[in-house]
Amino acid sequence: VDDAARLRAEDLDLVRAVRRGDPAGWQRLLAAYQDKIYALCFRIGGRRWADDLAQDAMIRVIQGLDSYDGRSRLSAWIYRVTANVCLSRLRSEKY
């Protein structure tokens, strides 16, 4: 099994665990992605906005996880959700 297939399988296992309500799944998701989400928010919004944007993005990821269909890597989907949250919020704040 190549690395891409292994990563896709790990993504799908993680999503299934979270969807089942498995606390360990939630912990793995947070551990794997919270720093990456924050870093992207910091790059887009700067220090002033990073904390709020990261919190909003994580909430949106959690709320939208049921819409993740596995066609792309979970990290790519989370990155896109995070970027959309940041850009939308900054537009509304007239950043």
Image (cartoon, rainbow, N blue to C red):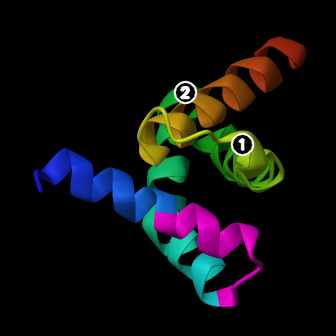
Look at mark 2 in the image and give the residue it sits on.
Answer: 44
Q: Is residue 17 magenta?
A: yes
For label 1, the crowd category at 10 Å Cα-Cα, with few meaning under 14, some 14 to 19 and many 20 or more, is: many
Query: Relative to 11, is 85 above or below?
Result: above
Q: Which x, y percent locates residue 86?
A: 69, 29
Q: Does the magenta stretch include residue 32?
A: no
Residue 52 visible within the image: no
- Residue 53 numbered mark, or none: 1
Report how many numbered discs are placed on residues in the image.
2
Q: Which x, y percent locates residue 72?
A: 44, 33
Comparing 83 with 14, the one in front is: 14
- Residue 2 numbered mark, or none: none
Q: Which x, y percent locates residue 36?
A: 44, 52
- Magenta residues, as a range? 13-23
Comparing 3 with 59, the one in front is: 3
Contact (Cβ within 8 Å) of mark 2 with mark 1: yes
Query: Relative to 24, is 10 above or below?
Result: above
Q: Which x, y percent locates residue 38?
A: 54, 51
Residue 44 visible within the image: yes
Comparing 84 with 8, the one in front is: 8
- Which quadrant of the structure image shows residue 19? bottom right
The amino acid on which the numbered mark 1 sits, given as a three-letter code, is Leu
